[in-house]
Amino acid sequence: MTTVFFKGLGLIGSSLAQAIKLAHPDVIILASDPAPATIPYARQQGWLDAGVSEFERVAEADFIFLASPVDQIVADLKTLATRPLKPGVIVTDVGSTKQAILTAAAALADQKITFIGGHPMAGSHKSGVTAGRPDLFENAFYFQVPLNATAAQQAHLQALLSGAKVKWLTVTAATHDAIVAQISHLPHIIAAALVNQTKERFADQPLGMRLAAGGFKSVTRIAAADPTMWTAILLANAPVIRRQLADYIAHLQTLDQAIATQEAAAIHRFFAQAKHSRDQLNAPVKAPFYDLFLNLPDQVGALTAVTGKLATAGISITNIQLLEVREDINGILQLTFSTAAAHQAAQALLATEYELIERG
């Protein structure tokens, strides 16, 4: 019987636990979490077998997942190094930075305990156990950053997480931290700064914040993420984030200078380069994706109706996003599919009831 221990059942931890239980019903899942309501909720949902205090019963685990904020993961690794653990146990984490975590995990490696750094590249601006769901990571990239693991041990962890349906990538800690600092950490800083600056700008004009919608909400959605988690991330990956933040500020200063000197060509180049690079994100790659856009009526249950039709027809969605949403008109729903066949089937199914939109 395989036993899996989770320290932390927030969005990421609870989603992984549910994916494991769905694919491997016989696996025993134990967990601890500091939030009082978390364990009772998870037990009630049926995917948690037992709640424990801190690292109680951790010696029973074949796999240990550390799914707390990064600073807590570092502290927990040091604690685990002092505990008797099951021979052959695999310890992993889901932290958004890896260099600090692998440094802390060296104490486990010294005792011949296997550690594999992990980071699923999916999430939500929502947090907590109630936001978790087993399909959160479907088709998302999942970084593996092994410290002292063999290929067989990495494959063993991947098999346990087969129900998450992720795409695995093995990288070094330095590579991981540089990538996520640019595509995840920096955008969260920008979104939060924009929200804060806008709030200050409209301090005496409350109508301004009420009117903020469409592009503003799309750009700043991730600013609603958990402040405790993001404080830990920025402190743990500080050197890399500071370098990339300085680069970003330099770009803003260059644009500011172009505006001040009325350099139309430089301003145009700024936006043209950005448009070209952004368009490339949708260009076909080795694993192409296919987008379908439709007008979504501003009605209760409209989104559920669309996804329900696709689910009934057996059409899998890779990603789903609401674009240019305003409170008084229809929203634009972007559905992404991993195959041309799924895209075509969805198009044929939905065209009879919804207005499909061509977007360049």
Image: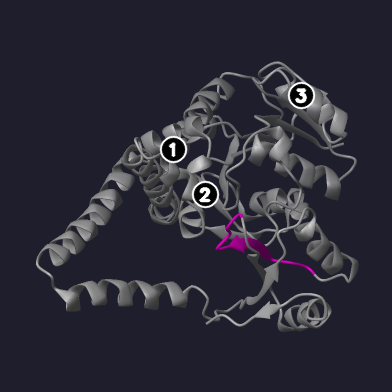
Q: Name the residue under label 1.
A: 233
Q: Name the residue under label 3.
A: 39
Circle 3 Cα neighbour tier, 10 Å, few/some/many (<14 / 14–19 / ≥20): many
Q: Name the residue under label 2.
A: 221
**Image: 232 above or below 133:** above
Q: Distance between the residues labelled 3 and 2?
A: 28 Å
Q: How far apart are marks 3 and 1 (CA)?
A: 25 Å
Q: Distance between the residues labelled 1 and 2?
A: 18 Å
- The image position of residue 199, as x and y in percent, is 38, 39
Q: Can residue 69 be seen in this view?
A: yes
The span shown in magenta is 316-327
Q: Quadrant of the N terminus?
A: top right
- The image position of residue 121, as x and y in percent, is 57, 53
x 71%, y 43%: residue: 16
- Identify the element where label 1 is drawn: helix
Q: Judge left or right: residue 38 versus residue 248.
A: right
x 83%, y 68%: residue: 310
**Image: 93 above or below 348:** above
Q: Do the residues labelled 3 and 1 touch (CB within 8 Å)?
A: no
Q: Is residue 302 magenta?
A: no
Count of numbered marks: 3
Q: Which mark is residue 139?
A: none
Q: Does the magenta stretch include residue 319?
A: yes
Q: Which of marks 3 and 2 is nearer the N terminus?
A: 3
The furthest residue to the left? 261
x 51%, y 47%: residue: 222
- Identify the element where label 2 is drawn: helix
Circle 2 Cα neighbour tier, 10 Å, few/some/many (<14 / 14–19 / ≥20): some
- The image position of residue 174, as x and y in percent, is 39, 51
x 62%, y 37%: residue: 127
